[in-house]
Amino acid sequence: MGRGSRVGMSAFVAFIVGVAAILSLLLGDNPALFGEQPGSDELARRLALPGDALLRLVVIIVAVSIVIGIANLLFAHIGRLAQRKFTSAVLLASFGFTIYWYVTRQGDTSLLEAVQVPIESSLAALLFLSLAQGGARVMQKRADIWGMLFVVVVLVVLLGSLPLAELAPVKTWSDWLMAVPVSAGARALLLGMALGAIVAGARALLGQDRSYRG
Amino acid sequence: MSEEFNWLDYAEPAESAPEPPQRSGRRRFLPRLPSLPRLPRLPGRPIMPGLPRLPMPALLRRRRAEATLEQPSATDLLGGHDERPLDELDDRLLSLRERSVASAQPSAESRQELYDVDDVLVTPEILEKPGGVISAVALSKAQQQQIELLRDIVGGAPQANEPSGRRLLRAAPLFSLSAVPRIIGTGIILLMVSLPFVSPDFAEGERPPSDFDEDRHGAIAVYNLLDNLSTADFVLIGFEYGPTAAGELDPLADLLIRHIVAQGAKPLIVSSKPIAIVHAQNIIREINRSVASAELRLERGSDYHILRYLPGGSLGLRELSENFADVVRVSAKGELTGLVIKSLSEMSLIVLLAEYAEDMRNWAEQVMPEADGTRLLAATGYAAAPIAQVYADAMDEIAGLLVGYRDVYTYGEKLAFNFGELPQAQPEVAPASPETATVPPVETTGEQAAQLERVLSTAFPSPTKTVLPTATSLPTTTPLPTVTSPPTATHLPTATATLETIRIVEVISPQQVRIRRGPTTADDILQLARAGDSFEVTGANGDESWYRIALSNGLDGWIAAFLVEERMVTAAEFRSGQASASANLADERVILWLESIVSLGKTRPRFYQSDSPAPGDELEYIWMRDRSQEAPRLHAMTFGTLAAILLIAVGNVFYALAALRRRGREAQSE
């Protein structure tokens, strides 16, 4: 099959499946849309079936892809063992040990709490240090009015978060910053994401959104 | 056109139009579909007449040559993938391609505008060869390291004449003077965060209140809705956080789950993150470890359920809302749960523990539209709070929001207060000792007595009623905290006793006011008071900006003078008013407390070791958790924030001054 045919076919399939899913999710299980007519319940139920089936299909594919991803990761690192990659050996040993632990200890998952939670929590804590260091160097990188504004806002919000009665006036400013500009920004982000999702979905359905590689 | 990757290929496009990319000699099984006629281009729209096909970088070409059929690499797959011919691209894609090529040119401006990343990504310098022809890109050592590491990652072999990434890293100095300020800053933060754990003297900052302020409607709603659950209720818990957020969200999850199971309701835990499922199991294991008696431990499959993982992120959540009956049928271990629940609307509540704003968005947009009246309570960390707050404000289905560790503290205090302590004794009747406190005799009349009788008869049928014949013989409470009176208090004249008048203060602030352990805002909060509450004054500090007052439980507290109005009343008037208020309060709390037993006693009590609590029985509470580290953690947060503020302020002042000096010198030299 030629490239043009393939592209046309994939766009066609995407369009049909997408429209079917949207219509099914929109009209299915909603007998009120069809009025008080006999059989409207059954019609609404039937209309929901394609959407449910497609949704389950996607979920199953995602689940299977996770399994494939794990297998691929393992095979890739087994291949790297031949190149004497120490990190791959550690990864494979950890994988095997975790499986062994889980199986021999009747589903004990304490390794997660003993190893992964402390490590990831520590990494998250490092983020605080990095942000503080970055915040201290804002004026080194951008010594202008915007950098200054950024630093002032950061300091006001941080001071406002301190539980000290002496800082009550600052807390008022901090609360205002969080309630008005931050909330407005968050709402704008959400609106933008929603509009972007609608546009991206429409473009994908109409076959316009394809990478230029095909 | 050079075959090598060269920056100047972008800066100076080929003069002659390159030959259009031809497809390789693959066989076509179907004839190419005829192209649709193109729409006329808008006038003035710049379209590049033709773009050069980018040559493959040498590294990729080598990798492609090294790859074998048995061991194909990602590079090989990438290299083997034909690009779409340019004539198949529509105007929009051509324009995008044109822009992407143009943006790849490093310009002088872009070097200046690389805000905060130029330490990491150093723009390559263009070297001039002796002949005057610019044709090479000089890479810094750091860039060479990065390339070598990247080569390691993608499986490329190190080049024979080039030092490997690891050798370069090893050769890099472990310490440089430029790192000293960063090391000092980090050290200061770590030191300040550690201090509260080392010594209790480092306890800067107010602790959060023991009850949510009146304006925290959402947090109050969370508590009240969970507190009204009963044994017939199911609560769906969206456990959407993993180990990264465990430090912040584990205490919240622990408290909310304890509250739910303490009410006798059954949590159904579900997640779109596989690791969160495992973590939820471990949280419940920790809850069970904190309960001494095996009878009270939560059993999987009867007291709670952990449902299967929902793959697909937002699509998985959509499936949860659309096919709820199927999702609840299977547990995370693949076993049948035996639950027959048709839809989300049969859930009494939905509780979401969200690490990211994205989780909140997914639940609000994919799950809640199908919830059909079931309300959602959200608990998030500080990072997700701004977006979560927007949803909480905008959606009626979201009843409340808890954020971060300060809410954990208040929630825990409130839960402990409401379930852990019995109604406080009046000092005249049963003075509280530091060890125990008993419930005073409560004189009830009329409607209150009838209500008590009704509750008691429901809670304790005839045999049990002999154990608890009246509301006055309730079990012993947990030890009350001891209070040390600050030595600086100046006692007021005692002549009031002989004149049968006493000095009292009445709260005039329209908002709740805090009664503290000492005459400063740094002291712990003992309890809250509302407008109209009155207390006997037993002392004041030096400037009388704080009054020491006698609380109804026999302890002394301190209240700020500007929040109250002082006056003199006769002792008899004050006692009668207090007794009436205390009796009402005590009655209400006895009723509430007994009603909680009634609801719990329907199936299996979660609060007591025995089904029929008798005086002297030791109480064991499912909600009890180790809270010994909560206060140091709160103070550590305060100290850590203080250290960060200092670091940011000092650092930026220093750099701003340095920038001013530099600009002054530049201005002088010009």
Image: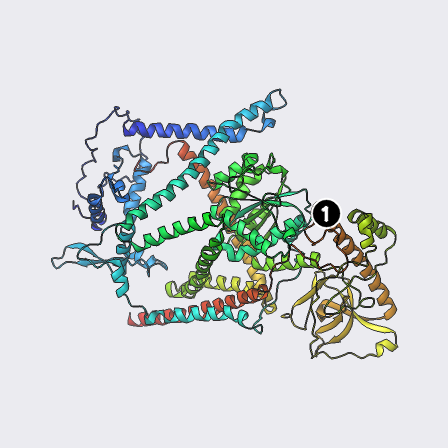
> In the rendered view, how is the structure colored?
rainbow
A172 and B465: which is toward the camera: B465
Image quadrant in which the N terminus of chain B is located: top left
Report the residue that reaches farthest toward the front: A104
Report the residue that reaches farthest toward the left: B131
Q: Amino acid at mark 1?
A: Ser
Left or right: where A38 falls relative to B18: right
Pointer 1 indicates a residue of which chain?
Answer: B
Residue appearing at x 88%, y 77% in the figure: B498
Residue B372 seen by the camera: no
Left or right: where B144 falls relative to B495: left
B601 lies above or below B408: above
Where is residue B68 shown, x and y percent of the image? 22, 41
B156 and B563: which is toward the camera: B156
Image quadrant in which the C terminus of chain B is located: bottom left
| Mark 1 Cα shell of 10 Å, populated few (<14), some (14-19), many (≥20) | many
Where is residue B25 shown, x and y percent of the image? 19, 31
B327 lies above or below B145: above
Residue appearing at x 55%, y 63% in the figure: A160
Where is residue B428 shown, x and y percent of the image? 83, 68
Residue B40 seen by the camera: yes
Where is residue B274 shown, x and y percent of the image? 47, 45
- Secondary structure under the numbered disc 1 in the rendered image: helix
Q: For mark 1, what is the residue?
A: B599
B511 and B618: which is toward the camera: B618
